[in-house]
Amino acid sequence: ARAEDHLRDGGFETVQRMPRGDSRKKIARYERWVDTQGEQGQRAMLANTELSNSELAGTDLSAADLSGALLTGARMTGCKLSMCNLAHADLTRANLMNADMRGINLTGATMSRANLRKADLGTVKGRDSKGRATGKTWRADLSGADLSRANLTDASLIGAKLDGANLVQANLMRADLRGASIGRANLRLAIVLDALTGPMPDRKAALKPRTP
């Protein structure tokens, strides 16, 4: 794999470039690892990986480490990204429509012009190896993320952390922001028509479908 220096937050990080086939195989092994609960496949280390314009629709990358990855223009519709680490990743113009992003870490990520229509960026409840609830809940963290001009129409952001996020000209029409924290977020010229706000709903209310 080749590498290049990538400037981020005033310092240089190494971005790993690999042939498209190699990255696809690595992701396929990771999906197998997730499906078999670690019995087969291999846990992927994809931090700082170059995956721009990749076709990843429907891929299961739950709990994967993609921190610092370059995913500009990536097609990720319907992806399973629950508990995924995408801190400081570049998702400019990425298509994440209908993606499961509950409990995701997107702190400092760049998501300008990304399509997050109907994406689920809500909370996820912790469970043990036997599927029993642990009582712990993880919130999606988008603190300091750049979501300028992003499309968040009909997205669920229940309980999400949006503190310090850049939401300039973002489309939040009908988005569910109940329980979300938006301290110091920049919402200049953002579209918030029919967005839901207020306290975090209880579980039954959160599962109840919204009236069109």
Image (cartoon, rainbow, N blue to C red):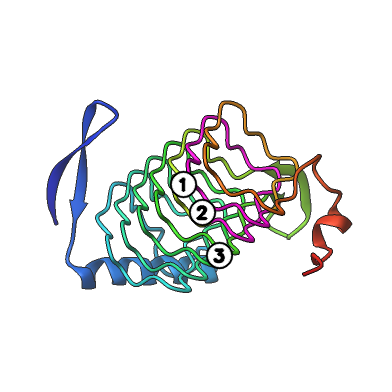
The one of 179 and 151 positioned closer to us in this rendering: 151
Point 24% across, 25% down: residue: 10
- What is the CA distance from the residue labelled 1 to the residue labelled 3? 18 Å
Q: Amino acid at mark 2?
A: Ala
Q: Which mark is residue 166?
A: none
**Amino acid type indicated by mark 1:** Asn
Q: Main secondary structure of the magenta part?
A: loop
Disc 2/disc 3 C-alpha distance (Å): 12 Å
Looking at the image, tell me whether mark 2 or mark 3 is earlier in sequence order: 3
Report the residue marked by disc 1.
85
Image-based side of 153 in relation to 108, left or right: right
- Magenta-tinted stretch: 152-175
List the residue tagged with mark 2: 63
The image shows residue 59, relative to residue 174, as above or below, that is below
Give the residue displayed 83% in from the left and 48% down from the top. Answer: 201
Closest to the observer: 176 or 128? Answer: 176
> What residue is shown at x 29% (from left), y 52% (from top)?
70
Residue of label 3: 37
| Contact between labelled residues 2 and 1, with CB atoms less than 8 Å apart | yes
Q: Is residue 98 above or below residue 197?
A: below
Residue 78 percent coordinates (x, y)? 52, 70
Which element is circle 1 on? loop
Circle 1 residues within 10 Å: few <14, some 14–19, many ≥20:
many
